[in-house]
């Protein structure tokens, strides 16, 4: 058992602070990773503060992990010491249900084991995430990362990247489609990059007029301000696909009105009640569909990383020290993010910001 330094929280009401805990000893199929960078997902904030009512403490958040392999078990085949590895939102699953057999571990019929805010399978030990020095993960749930990439900008691909790549692929978004990405934060900015790379006409649908210029730089062809009722009317019934990354319950009706005949809006952001209620008319008109999507399976996560390496796609990041994590959370709440915060884990290891 090895003690690792981390930042975590003992309760929903506490700020994150320095914390130590024990990682399990690596087994024969485990990869032991020294963490270099960890992205800050809005889910970290939701779970640290128990927004979803399912949090277990003490909690070390973080599921956008990039690091260097420092040891591998005897049966590990796909990674060696010195390789760069990634870990996302899951660290285990049942491995034999229909979903797991299809490489869709995120939809495991018995529930995937999350990287943090969960229990190791068959054990009372809590899983703890990437705001820590090192992590031990079974190789199925570790992906290979091209060492030539800008690693701090790769970290967010492990959640924000795969969560947007997967639905865009599943609904076969591409050339000739008018695609709306709702919300320009961590997920949204990756949604713009992927939709553009797949050949779509991309529209950012945002509450923040000040983000328009950045959206164009990231690849958006147009920007639609969702608070401008007249502009929303002009775009009504015109979208082939919408990817909704709004992190809280909100009124879906004005967004649904943007969909054309048979078009789909996929929710990836809000997991709690969507209020006010969806009006039946919002989906009956134009035979619209509203769907959801969770991260992506391990094979697709590797496919996404390989696609990014081939096409030079990474996140736009603001590097922060772990000591500033509580202020970072406040900025996320104000939608003040450009466009993913990433923690440089040197700050944890040395105990200083520099
Ligand atoms: P983020 O970086 O904080 O970005 C969210 C963006 O949504 C904001 O920047 C803002 O963009 C917009 N927004 C915020 N509040 C809004 C409101 N009340 N109404 C309309 N728009 C609003 O968050 P993120 O890390 O991208 O995560 C987004 C959500 O996805 C979170 O709830 C997270 O838990 C969830 N998530 C889900 C999955 C999954 O597997 N389904 C995976 C990862 C994360 P504008 O300023 O452009 O309006
Ligand atoms: Zn996430
Ligand atoms: Zn399963």
Image (cartoon, grey):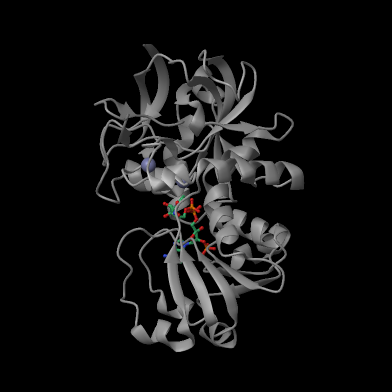
Query: Taking 272 as reference, is 329 left or right?
Result: right
Residue at 63% x, 44% y is 303
Expressed as whole percent of the image width and height from the top left, the position of residue 98 reads 40, 47
Q: Quadrant of residue 274?
A: bottom left
Query: Where 48 sits versus 348, above or below?
Result: below
Q: Which quadrant would the C terminus be assigned to in this image?
A: top right
Q: Is residue 206 above or below residue 137?
A: below
Would residue 111 appear left or right of 155 to someone viewing this image?
left
Residue drawn where x is 47% and y is 80% of the image: 288
| Count of marks placed on residues | 0
Q: Tell me which residue sits at (31%, 76%) in the image.
A: 277
Q: Position of residue 313 (x, y in %)?
A: 70, 47
In percent of width and height, residue 2 lies at 39, 12
Q: Residue at left 44%, top 53%?
A: 294
Q: Of 102 and 281, which appears nearest the observer?
A: 102
User: The N terminus lies in which quarter of the figure?
Assistant: top left
Foreground of the two, 104 or 248? 104
Q: Is residue 200 left or right of residue 234?
A: right
In the displayed structure, 177 sits above or below 97; it is: below
Q: Is residue 185 visible?
A: no
Between residues 250 and 346, which one lies in front from this camera angle? 250
Residue 351 at x, y percent in the picture? 49, 20
Residue 155 in view of the camera: yes
């Amino acid at each position: 058992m090895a003690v690792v330094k981390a930042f975590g929280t003992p309760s929903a009401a506490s700020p994150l602070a320095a914390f130590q805990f024990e990682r399990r000893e690596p087994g024969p199929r485990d990869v032991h990773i020294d963490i270099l960078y960890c992205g800050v997902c809005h889910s970290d904030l939701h779970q640290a503060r128990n927004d979803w009512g399912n949090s277990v403490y003490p909690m070390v958040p973080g599921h956008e992990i990039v690091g260097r392999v420092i040891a591998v078990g005897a049966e590990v085949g796909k990674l060696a010491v010195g390789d760069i590895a990634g870990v996302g939102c899951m660290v285990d699953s049942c491995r034999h249900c229909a979903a797991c057999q299809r490489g869709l571990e995120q939809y495991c019929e018995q529930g995937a084991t999350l990287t943090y805010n969960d229990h190791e399978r068959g054990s009372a030990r809590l899983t703890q995430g990437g705001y820590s020095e090192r992590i031990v993960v079974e190789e199925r749930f570790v992906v290979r990362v091209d060492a030539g990439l800008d690693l701090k900008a790769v970290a967010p691909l492990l959640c924000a990247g795969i969560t947007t790549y997967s639905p865009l692929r599943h609904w076969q978004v591409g050339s000739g489609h008018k695609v709306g990405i709702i919300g320009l934060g961590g997920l949204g900015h990756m949604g713009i990059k992927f939709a553009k790379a797949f050949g779509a006409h991309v529209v950012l649908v945002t509450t923040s007029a000040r983000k328009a210029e950045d959206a164009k730089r990231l690849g958006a062809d147009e920007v639609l301000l969702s608070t401008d009722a007249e502009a929303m009317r002009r775009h009504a019934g015109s979208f082939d696909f919408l990817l909704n990354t709004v992190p809280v319950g909100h009124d879906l009706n004005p967004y649904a009105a943007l969909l054309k005949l048979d078009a789909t809006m996929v929710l990836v952001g809000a997991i709690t009640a969507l209020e006010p209620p969806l009006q039946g008319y919002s989906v009956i008109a134009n035979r619209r569909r509203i769907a959801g999507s969770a991260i992506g399976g391990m094979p697709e996560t590797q496919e996404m990383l390989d696609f990014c390496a081939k096409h030079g796609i990474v996140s736009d990041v603001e590097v922060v020290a772990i000591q500033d994590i509580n202020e970072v959370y406040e900025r996320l709440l104000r939608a003040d993010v450009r466009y993913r915060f990433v923690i440089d884990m040197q700050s944890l290891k040395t105990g200083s910001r520099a």
